[in-house]
Image (cartoon, coloured by chain):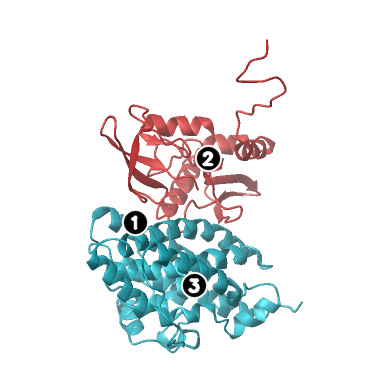
Chain colours: A red, B cyan
Amino acid sequence: MVNARHPRGQHIDIVPAAHAARLAARRASPDESLWALLDCVMDPEVPALSLWELGVLQDVRREGERVVVVVTPTYSGCPAMEAMEEALRQRLAETGHHHVTIERRLSPAWTTDWLSSTARNALRTYGIAPPDALRCPQCDSAHVTQISEFGSTACKSLFRCEECGEPFDYFKPH
Amino acid sequence: MQTAASSDLCAYSTALGDDALILGQRLAEWVSNAPSLEEELALANVSLDHIGRARMFYGHAATVAADGRDEDSIAFGRDTRTFTNVLINELPRGDFAFTMVRQFLVDAFNVPFLTALSASSEPALAAIGEKAVKESTYHLRRSRDWVLRLGDGTAESHARAQRAADEIWGYTRELFEPFGAEARLTAAGVAANRASFEPAWRDEVAATFAEATLRVPENTWSIRGGRDGVHTEHLGYLLAEMQFMQRAYPGQKW
């Protein structure tokens, strides 16, 4: 019997293409230990996500004595960028890497398509509705109203749930 | 295709940085003065996007110039006559209607402009365009909504929005006038031809104003000068406040 929801021949990809491309780049890197080291560096404003999961951390590699970290800013004016770069430097310094260069890469522009399903779940658990899944993170109702197009940080907007009455942040699709 | 001169590239990036910085500073003036907390957050966020954009353009200008200046010295170490922003961006913030009508008129220009810039043959400019257009698209959504709400709101909000449109209208023409370095860079495939966006901009403004029950002002007057460093009297006051710390304590860092 053909499953009506998943008809034969239909291709279902549960890893978004943009995230899959980032994963492939990371797996091809010769320095997995450096990546693993930075996995505990979290976004200072959204501590549910690491900078890798957020899509800010693009690359980390050795160039001789030096460690080069490539980051992509979320929004042009995000004031957390400097704190993020400082946190990356600090983590590397803790593990003996004192010669660090941080490069900012603008293109391709940061997009929420880079958030993995794990990252989206982490956001929801933390109380932030993930991009393109606008439901109340408390009670899962879709009956919500926008309060403001801008929230406490550039990457979020502010909503209220009409079922449970709780306000919540929505991570804007970008 | 000609090769772009570095002096033109530097002038172009600086002018685009000036456009972004001056509007960003005007928006930042709303912090602690906005009609509601949500609007204050929104205005501050839009301001930060513009200031961040200015940093990227200035950073590129400094790289091209390679004369020891950096983004801070470009922002804080120049006087009015060397700022080359369009005049519309330096006009005082006025009331909330003035700020939102101006923002709508500028956002509606910035979206097609930055889209075109993202196809620049200069990779650094293309990258800034690609990044900034996503933000301006979001800004436009909000500023357009406010024009509708104010224009088609109460008699008072309608009157204020119409008055703002009438006051600002003559400043919009400068948005579409290519300046010297820019015209040469357009021929080299580096700059976007700003004149080409005017018909679509007019259509967008006409459609939004019609829905907002606002009258599109007539083209009875227009004013230009910003690209030549000739400004309204307002820019000097803006710079005096914005540059105070670096003027009083040159080279001071946080």
Disc 3 secondary structure class = helix
Disc 2 secondary structure class = helix
- The residue indicated by pointer 2 is A52
Q: Could you tell whether A79 is left or right of A173 in the image? A: left
Residue located at (27% from left, 34% from top): A166
- The residue indicated by pointer 3 is B17
Q: Which mark is residue B57?
A: none
The answer for which chain carries disc 3 is: B
The answer for which chain carries disc 2 is: A
Between B58 and A143, the one lying in front of the other is: A143
Residue located at (48% from left, 60% from top): B136
Q: Are marks 1 and 3 on the same chain?
A: yes
Q: Position of residue A154 (x, y in %)?
A: 40, 51
- Residue that protrudes farthest toward the top in the picture: A1
Between A136 and B69, the one lying in front of the other is: A136
C-beta proximity under 8 Å, tags 1 and 3: no
Q: Position of residue B102 (x, y in %)?
A: 38, 71
Check the picture and name the quadrant holding the C terminus of chain B.
bottom left
Residue located at (52% from left, 68% from top): B203
Q: Position of residue A43 (x, y in %)?
A: 42, 43
Marks 2 and 1, Cα distance to the nearest angstrom? Answer: 27 Å
The amino acid at mark 1 is Ala
- The part of the image, by quadrant, that contains residue A77 is bottom left
The amino acid at mark 2 is Trp
Q: Which mark is residue B42?
A: 1
